[in-house]
Amino acid sequence: MKAFAIYCTDKPGTEQKRLEARAGHFAHIEKTIDNLFVAGPLKNAQGDTVGSLLIVKAETAEYARAQLEADPYFHADIWADIRITEFTAAAGDWIGGKIW
């Protein structure tokens, strides 16, 4: 199973849409949590949410995108930009050290 980093930036002025979709988003995350390595909001210096970062388990970038498109945040049209890139965890606490 591969990992894909999904980096989403919010459109300006979508804070209310994000709040309205939050309960559905959390339900979706609970339903699909086994497909996630990690996920959470991106914050600016003032602590405001400005996007989302997910690292998902998937065989292809297309499957990773399909997982994202099933999220109520996607349907709320809050993201201005979505980038999906294959990711290799190479070092750090999450993987217990390093891979080399």
Image (cartoon, rainbow, N blue to C red):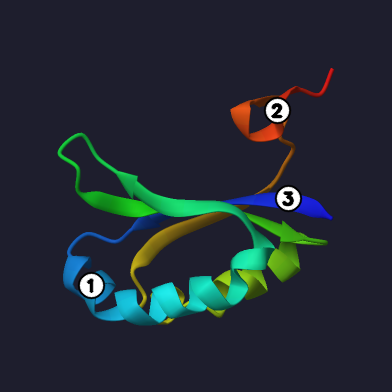
Name which residue type carries label 2. Answer: Gly
**Residue shown at 32%/58% (left/top)?**
10
Quadrant the N terminus occupies: bottom right
In the depicted view, which residue is nearer to us: 4 or 96? 96
Q: Earlier in the sequence, mark 3 or mark 2?
A: 3
On residue 3, the disc is 3
**Residue shown at 74%/37% (left/top)?**
88
Q: Judge from the rendering whether residue 72 lies leftward or rightward of residue 67; answer left or right.
A: left
Q: Earlier in the sequence, mark 3 or mark 1?
A: 3
**Residue shown at 22%/68% (left/top)?**
14
Name which quarter of the figure residue 21 lies in. Answer: bottom left
Q: Give the mark toward the camera: 3 or 2.
A: 2
Residue named by callout 2: 96
Name which residue type carries label 1. Answer: Leu
On residue 19, the disc is 1
- Residue 32 x/y as whole percent: 61, 73
